[in-house]
Every structure is written in C-alpha cells, then in structure tokens.
Amino acid sequence: MVNQNALFAIYGSASNIINFISFDLAIPVAILMIVVAGVIYMTSGGADQKVALAKTIFTNVIIGLVIIFASWLLIDTLIKTIATTSTESGGIIWSWNEFPTNCIVGPEDALY
C-alpha cells in the first residue's frame, strides 16, 4: 500500500519546483534581460556591435521563454495523456501541477 500523504508531498514538491522555475524565476529574469537589451540598444549610439548585442540578447530571451513554456506544455500534455484519473488502475487522483488541498501530513507520515 502506497502512503498517500507521501505521494502528496512528492507531487506537491515537484509541482512547486516546476512552477517556481517556469513562472516565478523565468519571467522576472526575462524581463530584466529585456530591460538590459533595451538599455544597451538605447545607449549604443548607433554602434553596430552594441545594436547587434542588444538584438541577440532580446532574441535569446524570447527563444528561452518559448523553450521553457513549451517544455511545461509538453510535460503537462504527456502526464495528462499517460496518467489516468481512475484510482482503480492506480492512477493519480488530481491534476499533476496542482497541489491537492485535502491531504494531512503528520509526524507518522514522515519519510525517514
């Protein structure tokens, strides 16, 4: 028998890590890098090297965001396709990227 509270903890931690990287970390870093590219572009004074650097930074930021969100979408699609919501076949009983709120973890459920 699988300890349900341990599964809640594992899935909750994985979901929190994925959401932190995808949304809480990637978006602010991307905004910061877009601002940096804008400052470089505005202060370039027409110098071709600085204009090219600013365009490269901006392009790489957009490509990075596309990769991050495409990978999140791929993981979401695969898990929703493969995992069944039927508990009779041993499937998960909630959406993989949402932490279930109906779990109670006590000292007897610790993973040590």
Image: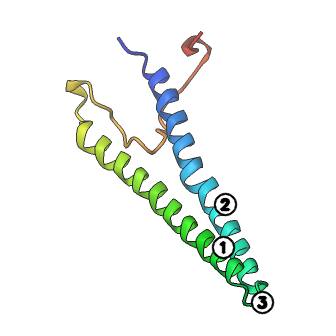
Q: Nearer the viewer, mark 1 or mark 2?
A: 1
If you read the primary sequence from the N terminus, does the residue marked by circle 1 or circle 2 appear first? 2
Whether residues under marks 3 and 1 lie with C-beta atoms below 8 angstroms apart, the answer is: no
Q: Secondary structure at mark 2?
A: helix
Residue 58 in which image quadrant: bottom right
Distance from label 1 to label 2 (Cα)?
18 Å
Residue 22 lies left or right of residue 49; in this view the side is left
Q: Quadrant of the N terminus?
A: top left
**Towards the viewer: 87 or 59:** 59
Residue 24 in which image quadrant: bottom right
Residue 78 spot, x, y in % from top left:
29, 44
Q: Quadrant of the C terminus?
A: top right
50 relative to 9, above or below: below
Disc 2 target residue = 29
Q: Which residue of the protein is positioned furthest toward the bottom in this rendering?
A: 46
Residue 49 lies left or right of residue 13; in this view the side is right
At label 2, the amino acid type is: Val
Disc 1 target residue = 53
If you read the primary sequence from the N terminus, does the residue marked by circle 3 or circle 1 appear first? 3
Residue located 59% across and 48% down the image: 20
Residue located 60% across and 62% down the image: 27
Disc 3 target residue = 45
Check disc 2: other Cα within 10 Å, few if <14, some if 14-19, many if 20+.
few
At label 3, the amino acid type is: Gly
